[in-house]
Image (cartoon, rainbow, N blue to C red):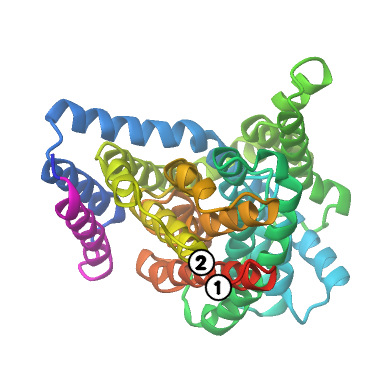
Amino acid sequence: MLTSTTLLIAIFLSIAFIIVASAVFKLHPFLALFVATLGLGLGVGLGPEQLIEAINGGFGGLLGYIGLIVVMGSIIGVILEKSGAAIRIADLMLSLLGQKRPALAMSLIGAVVSVPVFCDSGFIILSGLNKALSKRTGVAKSTLALALASGLYTTHTLIPPTPGPVAAAGNIGAGDYLGTIMLLGLIVSIPTLLAAYYFSRRYGPHIPSSAEVFPEPEQERMPGAFLSLAPILLPILLIAGGSVAGYFGWEEGAGMILRFTGHPLIALFIGLLFAFSLLPAMNEAYLNGWIAEGVKLAGPILVITGMGGAFGGVLKATPLGELVGGWVSGESYAGPLLLILTFLISALLKTAQGSSTSALVITSSILAPLVGTMGFDTPLELGLVVMALGGGAMTVSHANDSYFWVVSQFSGIEMRNAYRSYTVMTGLQGLVVLGMTLLLYWMLGAGF
């Protein structure tokens, strides 16, 4: 099996192939991903059985987590659109936040939602609002999609209780300092969100979307605010409750119920049940018809997302983690250099294998022995390490990241345009996080 520099070259070439095949030769992303996945596996020396197992495991493993969530989220989105509930919610948001900065509103909403909710689930739940806000304000849907995506992405990688930051803190011995890490994450998130907001405002209007036109509701009378909000807010509150129960280790009684109803799959199903109250009539035409349309919408997203998981599965079957670990074994790095190294390794793993949570977990495991020996032992110093890990884990999101496909497919943004907008934006976000982490290291007296 390939190791060292040749492995990195093979991974780089496979990613380049996906980009060129899709953007230049207009090859369908599914086929581009499959060819790249197969070529990478054979190129690095995986055996036939190992390669097939990695492809099937990556495809099925990712869809096993996100598949039903995508389907239920798509059905909820169709019901919100066709019933007029999305427009009702948009009107409510604009009355509360004003019509001058809808992109900023979506960014802030995403940032709040993603603290207890995974990016994928949050974007699926909220993406229908982009269309309604676009219709109401005239702001390009791509602008709103980028703002929402960046808000969700920022807090997902920086602020507990999302699994990645919590696991990273535990790996480096900062499990008792989650309050400090949450405060640092909030501080770092503010300029990161502002940078992404500026980017979405500046470049979003130039990114075409295949779904710019928001369909008129199929009923004249708009539903009430409570019924319109329930299918969105209820899953978010349930998932948040499940996160709290998991954080405090509540296993019995009410805790068990919270953990069950707080799973994204169950929470979205409950939200779907509430969404049925928005149907004009509980008959076959509306019930089965709108469900069928939601399932149809989810199909292409599931196929492409699954192939992204297969590509990541093959990457995980390579010795990439051991290779990166060998680079830092036994070395000594001063404070800011350790933070930069942490960021770079996390970014490399994120870019190579797609999962932000995996990048946080793997990198924190690799660097755990170095953190203590380099004198990083106070809550603030350990918190800054988690920030560097989180910044790397959002740099950069592309074809092997399920969130990339959720954002692009639910927003109607073609792959090549997603690369030159969303992917570039995630790189910008990561660099801002790194800059803020280094600035805080200096300001808090650790010194350069």
Which percent across, then down, holds residue 409? 46, 57
In the image, the segment drawn in magenta is 3-26
Q: Which residue is mark 1?
A: 448
Residue flagged by tag 2: what amino acid is it?
A: Pro
Q: Mark 1 and mark 2 in contact? Answer it, CB < 8 Å.
A: yes
Q: Nearer the viewer, residue 47 or 143?
A: 47
Disc 1 is placed on an element classified as: loop
In the figure, residue 385 lies in which quadrant? bottom right
Q: Residues within 10 Å of mark 2 (few under 14, many from 20)?
A: some
Residue 194 percent location from the top left of the image: 66, 75
On the rendered structure, is 386 left or right of 105? left
Question: Is 202 situated above or below 47?
Answer: below
The residue sitting at the top extreme is: 252
Name the residue tied to disc 2.
Answer: 336
Query: Looking at the figure, which quarter contains the C terminus?
Result: bottom right
Specify whether 326 is left or right of 195.
Answer: left
Q: Is residue 364 visible?
A: no
Relative to 279, residue 152 above or below: below
Question: In screen coordinates, is 258 left or right of 344?
Answer: right
Residue at (19% x, 50% y) in the render:
4
Q: As drawn, is 433 to the left or to the right of 81? A: left
Question: Where, by quadrant of the figure, is residue 415 drawn?
Answer: bottom left
Residue 287 in sight: yes
Q: Secondary structure at mark 2?
A: helix
Q: Main secondary structure of the magenta part?
A: helix
